[in-house]
Image (cartoon, rainbow, N blue to C red):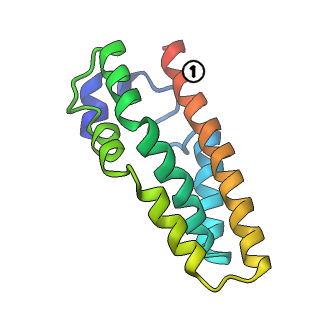
Amino acid sequence: MDRSKSSGYWLRRTRPPGGLPHLPTQAYISFATYLALKQPVCRLAMGYVLEGISGAYGVEYGSRMAEQLKLSKQQLSFFLVHGELDKGHSHDVLEVLEDAPLTPYEWAWCEYAAECTLSLYTALYNHSILSLVKS
């Protein structure tokens, strides 16, 4: 949070302090919570998607954001560090899932969780970028 505040973008938010997150964030968090409570193994499917995105794009997009938004690399360390560390993690997560004794029902849920995660994360990302462009 301190890094966000130091960027100056923190001050431009449109919601009141203590308000709920934007709708795409609420949807993403709600889905993750549902999976954790009702289909815990699907959190691995969610992780598979997120590790893949981070490993593939974290460093590249973190560097671009730092340049375009005139932010320091320290302010975007989450993207840069995770992007580097997450390379190959999606493969590791998939191996764990493939080795698990999942029923066809559980596999169907995992596939659904991966698809929803990609969709919800894309909505969250797009909303965040549009918010920056509008400010």
Q: In this view, does 57 lie to the left or right of 119?
A: left
SS at circle 1: helix
State the image quarter where residue 32 is shown: bottom right
Residue under circle 1? 130
Q: Which amino acid does the dot numbered 1 rest on?
A: Leu
In this picture, residue 104 sits left or right of residue 124: right
Of residues 69 and 102, the one drawn nearer to the viewer in this rendering: 102
Residue at x 45% of width, y 40% of height: 56
> Crowdedness of circle 1 by 10 Å Cα count: few (<14), some, many (20+)?
few
Relative to 135, is 42 on the left or the right?
Answer: right
Residue 77's quadrant in the figure? top left
Residue drawn at the location 31% of the way across and 50% of the way down: 85
Q: Do we see residue 41 in this rendering?
A: yes
Instruction: State the residue in front, 25 or 17.
Output: 25
Classify 34 as above or below 101.
above
Taking depth in this image into account, of 72 and 2 the one nearest to the observer is 72
Q: Which residue is drawn at 58% across and 55% down?
A: 29
Percent position (x, y) of residue 23?
64, 41
Relative height, residue 30 to residue 122 (above, below): below
Q: Is residue 99 above or below residue 85?
A: below
x then y, percent, for residue 27: 66, 49
User: Would residue 18 be seen by someone viewing this image from the given angle?
Assistant: no
